[in-house]
Amino acid sequence: MDDRETQHLGTTAPDLARAAELLRQGGLVAFPTETVYGLGADARQGRAVADLFAAKGRPAFNPLIVHLADMADAAQYADLSDDAARLAQAFWPGALTLVLPLARDHGLSELVTAGLATVGLRVPAHPVARALLAAFGGPLAGPSANPSGRISPTTAQHVLAGLSGRIDAVIDAGPCPVGVESTVVGFDGETPILLRPGGVPLDPLEAALGRRFSSWDDGRAISAPGQLRSHYAPRVRVRLNAEAPEPGEVYLGFGSGTGDLNLSPSGDLSEAAARLFACLHQLDALGRPIAVAPIPETGLGQAINDRLRRAAAPRT
Ligand code: AMP
Ligand code: MG
């Protein structure tokens, strides 16, 4: 289905008006968020959402996150418990997705939720994402703007490399500041569950509710599709916790020391998250196996290590 002419848009008001018009017509527009570039489609138009799955080659049992302009819009699509509202209040706009029970008369395409009784909602913080959502005036389904299973895009060039000819436009606002996807939180009854580590670390989330979260693989009953072991994957083999490269490998360093590339020479996890996918894209293009330095499992390191483990997982 490589039959679309992909417009490369800027961030001026006319550019965003053009993007909003394409979305109203059922088109696919990639847009910047603080985490990664998202691929937007009107979440109420089944045809547009079906095109989105096709463009990404994404399995249809994988639900999509719905992006909203404003926290006040959330109640139209989902029922927020007190704890959910507290997290929304504290972390929206931002890199947090809340998986919540669908509201009555939500009006979203069933494809968005993959037929589940829940929906993932997020209010992004990136000013261009917010301006686009305001111009569009509705809910946008927005998975990452890359072919399913491959490395997520943190620049418009990454988006075009993966999806040019399959989408209607990309809005180019330069590199994404956070660089890893949103943290996804759901609830099993009253119990908050970390479904995916991401741009908001676990500590401040637990502090906001004053209790510990369960982890999605603790054997909980909640359905969390899309948790594929192999994901965010380069074409080449990835080896983790490597103190040094073996012959033939390229080395992705962290902190002082060498490396063909270094996620953060000063050992800063925010910088490492922001650079992670760009470094993987760059090393993947060399076609040699990648060895990655150990990354501490604290703060944003949890999200970085989660993505690295999936990049290194055996392909299914
Ligand atoms: P992405 O591929 O970045 O769009 O990831 C979406 C993430 O949100 C996946 O980890 C999904 O499992 C999760 N997600 C979205 N909607 C739901 C839902 N209704 N129930 C459970 N998880 C969801
Ligand atoms: Mg993705």
Image (tube, rainbow, N blue to C red):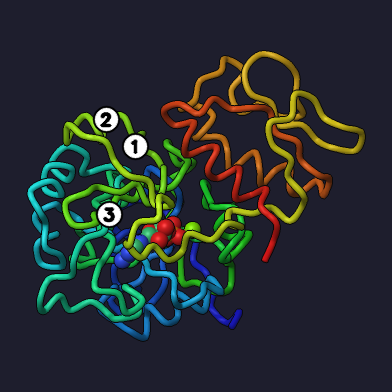
Residue at the bottom extreme, as displayed? 47
* Horizontal arrangement in the rendering, residue 31 relative to residue 87 (left or right): right
Is the residue at mark 3 in contact range of ligand 1, meaning its CB lies under 8 Å from it?
A: yes
Mark 3 Cα within 10 Å, few/some/many (few <14, many 20+)? many
Q: Position of residue 11 (x, y in %)?
A: 36, 50
Mark earlier in primary sequence (2, 3) = 3
Q: Amino acid at mark 2?
A: Pro
Q: Position of residue 32 (x, y in %)?
A: 40, 50
- Does 14 sit above or below residue 105? above
Q: Secondary structure at mark 1?
A: loop
Where is mark 3, residue-wise?
A: 186
Q: Amino acid at mark 3?
A: Gly
Numbered disc in front, either 1 or 3: 3
Where is mark 1, residue-wise?
A: 200
* Horizontal arrangement in the rendering, residue 126 relative to residue 52 (left or right): left
* Horizontal arrangement in the rendering, residue 33 relative to residue 249 (left or right): left
- Does 235 sit above or below residue 52? above
Mark earlier in primary sequence (1, 3) = 3
